[in-house]
Structures are given as C-alpha cells and as structure tokens.
Image (spheres, rainbow, N blue to C red):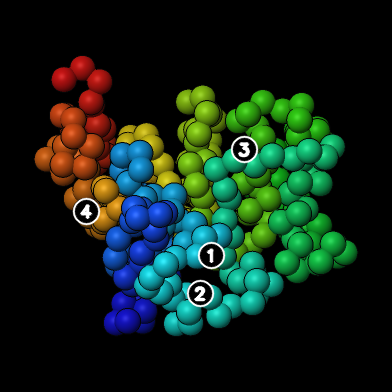
Amino acid sequence: MENQKENKLVFQGIVKEYGKKKVVDGLDGAIKDNAITSLIGPNGAGKSTLLSILSRLLKQDGGDVFFMEQKLQDYKSSELAKKLSILKQSNQMDVKLTVRDLVAFGRFPYSKGRLTATDWQKVEEAIAFSDLQDFADAYIDELSGGQRQRAFIAMIIAQDTDYILLDEPLNNLDMKHSVHVMKTLRRLVDELGKTVVIVIHEINFAAQYSDYIIALKDGKICYNDTTHRVINPHILHEIFGIAFDIIEKNDRKICNYFNL
C-alpha cells in the first residue's frame, strides 16, 4: 500500500488460474505515472493476463488492483472509462464505419452517443494527433492494417483518459507503422502527460521508447525497473534464454540477438 502515494496504479498479490495452472502467481508492483512502461517476456509469461487484470477486462483469482487509492473493482464502469482506457490485441468491426466514426466511439463515456461540439473537437484533435487527417473519411475496412491500428489508437486518444493500456499494438504491423505507433505513444506521455502501459514482443521497441520495463517469466515478475537497467545482456538472457549483444548509440541501447 505504501506505493499508492507515489503511483496511482498498484497491484498486489495478483493470481490468475486456468484450471490447475497459475498463469500469473502473486504479482506485486506499481505502474510509474507519466511514463511508458513495457511488459516484456516470452510467450505465456503472463503479460497480456496482467494487462487485462489491470484494465478490469479480466477478473483475478487472488490479490487486488488499486487505482487512485481505490480498489479497481469498486469503480463504476462509466466512471472508470473516463480515467483508464484499454486497446485489446484484436479489434474487429463488422459495421461500415469511417475513421471519424470510429474515433467518435472514444467519446461514448462522456456523450453516451449524443456527441456535443466539445466531443467532436476531441475527435478532430485525436485524428490530427495521430496524423490521420487524410484518412478521416475513409472506411476502416478499406485501410491497411497499420492505418487501421492508428485509427483505433486515435479512438483511445479521443477517450482522453490519463491511463492508456495497449495489448500488443504492434502485432502484424510493418516497421513504418510500428515506429509511427510508438512515436505517437511517446508523444502522449511527453506532450500530454499520459501514462501508457504496453505489452510488446519486439525488445528493441521497448528499449527505444519505454521509460520502464516489467519483465515476466513463468507467471512471475523477474524485473520491474528502468529501461536502461533491464536492457542488459545477462538480464535479457535470463528472461528469454538466448544470447544478447547490447549496442549503445546516442544514449540508447540496441539489442542484437539475431546472429550470436
């Protein structure tokens, strides 16, 4: 509980079981405010499970999540949606929507479907922030995968929450769109003071854009520290079980694990 005064999103003793298997086992930690925290680790480590519990998409079997000194479970959904947003790994839309229509969904916690002039202003600001003005009237199903993902992130930006959680937002994106997404998330923190938590597989994106890294393995947290400290060849070998060579350039670390 002592960390709650410094950090607004805190988790203690989190357990999640599927059958007899504990997917996460007694996780304790806190998310640093006004920063990007990346959740890294091998497949099955518990990254997406922890993120889903922190966003209340998934109910834990043990432990508690505290958000702004209140149990996460005690929030009304309408109240929580104005403070914390989540972008899931797969987002499917079966209806014919333009980018602007999709982004407008982000205003639902405030407008309940009746958008005001202020809501539409937030929509246009989110579209501009995501550099989607040229696609605002295009239909979602006509966009490339990268453009579509940027539109969903714009929807989250329009929701205007201080806490933004994203589950593998770079999944199936090419390099150009991955960089655009990460730069957008970085700007959300640096320019708007948001707190971003992201599940990510590509270690170099975590190394380049994160402030903090939470590393999981076998359902437990191995490390929860600054990016600079976690991006270490011995630590990464412990987490992923392969050799790493760390190259430093412009005060940033690049992870080579391709040809060692």
Looking at marks 3 and 2 on the same chain, the residue that comes earlier in the sequence is marked by: 2
- Residue 191 in the figure: left or right of residue 23: right
* Quarter residue 162 falls in: bottom right
Residue at screen point 36% across, 81% down: 5
- Residue 248 in the figure: left or right of residue 191: left
Residue hosting label 2: 72
Residue hosting label 3: 149
Q: Nearer the viewer, residue 170 or 184?
A: 170
State the mark number for residue 18: none
Specify few, some or many for label 1: CA neighbours under 10 Å numbering under 14, 14-19, or 20 or more.
some
Which amino acid is tagged 4?
A: Cys
Residue hosting label 1: 56
**Percent from the top left, x then y, of residue 84?**
57, 65
Which amino acid is tagged 1?
A: Arg
Instruction: Examine the rendering and report whether any part of residue 183 can be seen.
Output: no
Q: Using the numbered discs, state the Cα–Cα distance from disc 1 to disc 2 in whole angstroms.
A: 7 Å
Q: Nearer the viewer, mark 3 or mark 2?
A: 2
Specify few, some or many for label 4: CA neighbours under 10 Å numbering under 14, 14-19, or 20 or more.
some
Which amino acid is tagged 3?
A: Gln
| Residue at the left extreme of this rendering | 234
Looking at marks 1 and 3 on the same chain, the residue that comes earlier in the sequence is marked by: 1
* Marks 4 and 1 close (CB-CB < 8 Å): no
